[in-house]
Amino acid sequence: MTAFINPLKPRSRGIPQKIAEIKGWVRTAFALEEGVAISLSELSCRDESCPDVETVIGLLREGHPIEVHRLHMPLTEVSEADVLKLAAGG
């Protein structure tokens, strides 16, 4: 069952710092050039087999379709090891 997530709820003060940290891990793990934009989103997961919230990572390369990766956990729980595993195809 999906829980209601209030989009107007104040976000934790540590979120911007965590986002910057994850983007750094993604850039390193995927060996991305500076021109590649990284999008991070925390969304409600529609699949009943995953937690209520998932972190979606979008890699935006000019002239290419968006490359999307999903981690079945809230953004605040993402670790460098999770990103490295994702980049390795796991």
Image (cartoon, grey):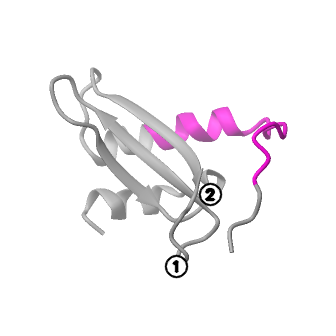
- In the rendered image, the quadrant that contains the N terminus is bottom right
Residue sitting nearer the eye, 3 or 68: 3
Left or right: residue 32 versus residue 77 is left
Residue at the disc numbered 2: 74
Label 2 or label 1, whichever lies nearer to me, is 1
**Residue at 69%, 39% in the rendered image:** 15
**Residue at 60%, 70% in the rendered image:** 51
- Residue 19: where, in percent of width, then height? 57, 38
Residue 70: quadrant of the picture: bottom left
Left or right: residue 71 versus residue 12 is left
Residue 89: quadrant of the picture: bottom left
Q: Amino acid at mark 2?
A: Pro
Residue at the disc numbered 1: 49
Q: Amino acid at mark 1?
A: Ser
**Element type at marker 1?**
loop
The boundaries of the magenta stretch are: 5-23
